[in-house]
Amino acid sequence: MLYAGVIEKVITPDFPTLLSGYPEPRDRYHTEVHDDLKVHCFYLRNEETEVAIITLDLISYKKPRVKKVREQIYQACGIKPENILISATHTHSAPACGSVPFNHDNREMYPYYLDQVSKAIVEGISEAKISAFLAKIAMGKGYCGKEQGVGGNRRDKDGPADPDVFVTGIKDAKDELRGVLVNYALHPTFLHAESRAISADYPAYIYKYFQDKNNDVVVGFQNGAAGNQSSRHFRTGQTFEEAKRVGYAIAAEAEKVLSELNYEYDVSLFTVHTELEPEMKKIPPVEEAKALQQKVKNDYQNSIKNNEPYAVQRTLECSLIGANNMLRTSMGGAEAVEAIAANNPLEIFVLGIGENRIVTVPCEIFVEFALRLKKESPFEHTYLASTSNGYGSGYVCTPKSYEEGGYEPTVSKYERTVGDSLIDKALELLGNN
């Protein structure tokens, strides 16, 4: 029989913090709290295994933190570290987790705050275990895509996208919905750099949609393969109203799926994981990085001068962000190389719930790799969650994108082989389990 516990904790900082996700402006300190940031804790146990699933309304939660908090959970309530999954939603309106946004170093800007986040995680999972109830569970998927004006490919509006809405539902013996875990591939960037409000972005409205109907339900969110997925070509603005429209659309589809599922009390649980030592790009010499930065800067300025469409300007602006980042890395020398190496190896994690599989990677990975994973998986319901169990050194891009250029392949520290290597290892785990 299955037992489950669900708890959420608020992790909104109580002091002004620099918001992460956009490199400019450098003084983007929050001046208000639009909606609380939260940690959502899900505990599952059967006769053989117990697992913990944690989702965080943060841009990332890096590898050293994951390792430490897994051990803290084990010490607090006995859940094995290898059975703990931690995913960041990747909101761009939460406190910076590094020293400066988009700088790849191993320092933390707010270690005290992140200690408080870790404390909330440990307390949340411990409370979820203590309050566990007889439960039944199910997973299914729906559809919500660019046809609904929700999301799509930000590099090419007609490019590959993943409209699947995966949802896991947990009910108690009274058939009351107690826990919901949603997976969708879309950058939480409805709020742009001009916003100084703390927010979970559109996932906040997924939570609100369900909790307005049942305040006792705990709702978590795992981002999918959103490396090249955003609302850039499909949104009507970068506002809370637009975030609400999209969050509610995804939530409504998830609710529909939940109503049609067959819930089971008796399901198997297991976890398995492996690691990949990724092939890294050679960091360019400073002069080469400067030349690229200047070229991209000129292209961006010309797009403004020529009054190009917003989507074109935004794409070039992101390319400039990538070039600036690579220049900073190049100028960082040995310290930058050491900091990048601290994110490796990359953990590939698989959680099995009955015949369903959740695969996670720590990177911002392009959607093409998730589509391949789903196509080649031997299981009907398999989804990929990114920015999980750590945070890698930038984007995992397709070989084609390296030829095309642009923001993601420029800022990435990985070679073009890494994406398929990650999926190869994931499929190997799926094939053996």
Image (cartoon, helix red, strand yellow):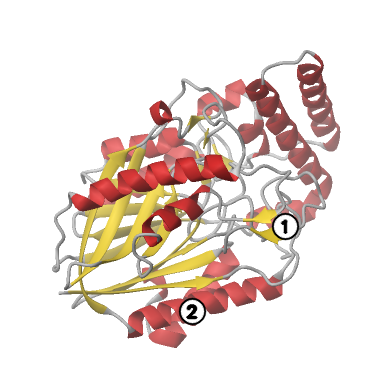
**Secondary structure of the residue carrying numbered label 2:** helix
**First reached walking from the N terminus: tag 1 or tag 2:** 1
Q: Is residue 313 left or right of residue 227?
A: right
Q: Which mark is residue 351?
A: none
| Residue that badge 1 annotates | 105
Q: At x 78% / y 44%, what residue is drawn? A: 24
Q: Is residue 158 above or below residue 27?
A: above
Question: What is the CA distance from the residue labelled 1 to the residue labelled 2?
Answer: 26 Å
Q: How far from the left and from the top, in percent, is residue 258?
A: 24, 52
* Residue 31 in the image: above or below residue 240: below
- Which residue sits at x=80%, y=33%? 289
| Amino acid type shown at disc 1 | Asp
* 10 Å crowding of disc 2: few (<14), some (14-19), many (20+): many
Report the residue at 79% width, 42% height from top.
Answer: 330
Mark 1 burial class by Cα count in 10 Å: few <14, some 14-19, many 20+: many
Query: In terms of secondary structure, where does tag 1 sit?
Result: loop
| Dot label at residue 122 | 2
* Of 288 and 364, the residue lying toward us: 364
- Is 359 on the left-hand or right-hand side of 205? left
Of circles 1 and 2, the one toward us is 2
Q: Quadrant of the C terminus?
A: bottom left
Query: Does the residue at mark 1 contact the one at mark 2 (Cβ under 8 Å)?
Result: no
Q: Residue at x 44, y 42 (%)?
A: 185
Amino acid marked by disc 2:
Val
Query: 138 and 337: which one is in front?
Result: 138
From the viewer's perspective, is residue 433 above or below residue 162?
below
Residue 371 x %, y %: 36, 35
Quarter holding the N terminus is bottom left
Q: Residue furthest top?
A: 306
Q: Is residue 144 visible?
A: yes
Tell me where residue 151 appears, x and y as whole percent: 47, 34
